[in-house]
Amino acid sequence: MDVLVSLCKRRGFIFQSSEIYGGTGSCWDYGPLGVELRNNLTRVWWRDFVQVRDDMVGLDASILMHPMVWKASGHTDKFTDPMVDCRECKLRFRADQVDEQPWTHYCPATKGNKFTIPAGEGCRHCGATRTLCPECGKGELTAPRQFNLMFKTFMGPVEEDATLTYLRPETAQGIFVNFDNVLQAMRLKLPFGIAQVGKAFRNEITPGNFIFRVRELEQMEIEYFVNPHDTVEGRPADEYWHQRWIDEYLAWFERYGMQRENLRLREHDKDELSHYSKRTVDIDYRFPMGWSELMGVANRTDYDLKQHAKFSGKSLTYFDEERKQHVVPYVIEPSVGVERPLLAFLADAYREEEVRGEKRVVLRFHRELAPIKIAVLPLLKKRGEIVSMAHDIRARLARNWRTVYDDTAAIGRLYRRQDEVGTPYCVTVDVKTVGDPDKGEAGDGQVTIRERDSMEQVRVPAAELESVFAMLLGETPWPEVAARYPRTA
Ligand code: GAP
């Protein structure tokens, strides 16, 4: 993880929020490359799960909602974690995580020497087990208390109970309260889904592991409504669609670069299920700190629509033409943040390789996720014609793809820099491209394209670059395109 955090900072992906003031520890800022990666991730998600499907529509609900929404959804009463406080250093921990952490111990058998003892183990010298604060090792911990994770704020100029509201802790509720609006406006037939990408806020007690658990997050949520009376392929529609969404997401993560062996399913036990859930399956990823939840796919039944109907007094049903009756749809909810898949794609893409005796760091991003698609590099920055042609090529390609120009180092170094940020293709303009008028040599108008993973290079007429990259950054694999052009060393 440290290697990724350091790469992300050094190469402009992710910075600690408010770093010059010491940072916040739970919020992160996305730099020039991070914002491209993030935008690419949300864009492909939207394209694959909304744009190309005829059973999905989108929504963008507000972050601040009526406080009754959170009463109806159960968040006011149930969105809590048990927490304990250290009486000495005043730090706060999730009660269920205290024993999972290493602990600090001032050992009386060694004249009070300080030791960091692994989670769940006792002191080798005095035999003590952890009873005190895992951080300072001195303070007693308080008894667990429930702590609501919603951020409170006030709507309007007066700070009083009547104006109290919350920053939404999930985007899902914006979809449920708009169910009828969307249904009527779009004249939808079950099954259909409503998708939303947006910020959510959780006052996590123990944020951490880089961007894995943050207090300001973004979610990409789908609420997929099905008729509970229908069957599909012999199974109740909700159960069929639950499994179908799990399978679709596994395939999606693999399609954009996560390796199957780094993904696993984890079924929630009955006593672990949320109050609204009939069945929940997490898709876990093998993050650098170990297996952890990447996303959840829950069968929320008709709980949310019924709750909002009860609290608002408005009917939230669907008219089943076939059975001539109103039904409250069941909801399958595939819910994923932006930060966790982003971290997983980063971790899976990261490779350290040896090339001709030297270490090469490369991010093998899927081309659609790569922050920069093409880097245009002049072989000699002293030659005006080479530099000017490289600039022209960059400007041409940038109309369609994020393309950068770089001449700040020798070519080998420039390639390594682009490898390290995952740029799939470099275009090099050299002396042969432009020729040498002093020697009476004409240029051949061809440039070199280098592919990141294989490091193979081909010579391509500069005039064909748009059509070549339309193939390479579309669906045509490198070997197929490369086979049409002469190889070069
Ligand atoms: N609407 C259901 C819901 O919000 P959740 O399991 O609490 O369910 C869904 O969250 C997903 O949102 C998680 O699987 C994760 O991808 C992301 N997520 C939740 N809390 C997060 C946090 N504090 N930091 C980063 N991502 C988070």
Image (spheres, rainbow, N blue to C red):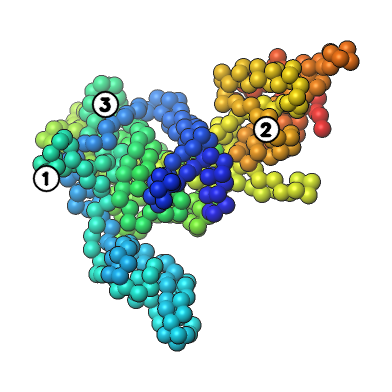
User: Which residue in the protein does label 3 denote?
Assistant: 182
- The amino acid marked with disc number 2 is Thr
Q: Are marks 1 and 3 in contact (CB under 8 Å)?
A: no
* Disc 1/disc 3 C-alpha distance (Å): 32 Å
> In x, y percent, where is residue 267?
40, 54
Which residue is depicted at the point 67% across and 26% down? 376
Residue 101 as seen in the image, left or right of residue 188: right
Q: Is residue 95 visible?
A: no
> In x, y percent, where is residue 100?
41, 67
Label 2: few (<14), some (14–19) or many (≥20) C-alpha neighbours in 10 Å = few
Labels 3 and 2: the sequence-earlier one? 3
Label 3: few (<14), some (14–19) or many (≥20) C-alpha neighbours in 10 Å = some
Most foreground residue, 358 or 341:
358
- The amino acid marked with disc number 3 is Val
Residue 408: mark? 2
User: Which residue in the protein does label 1 denote?
Assistant: 161
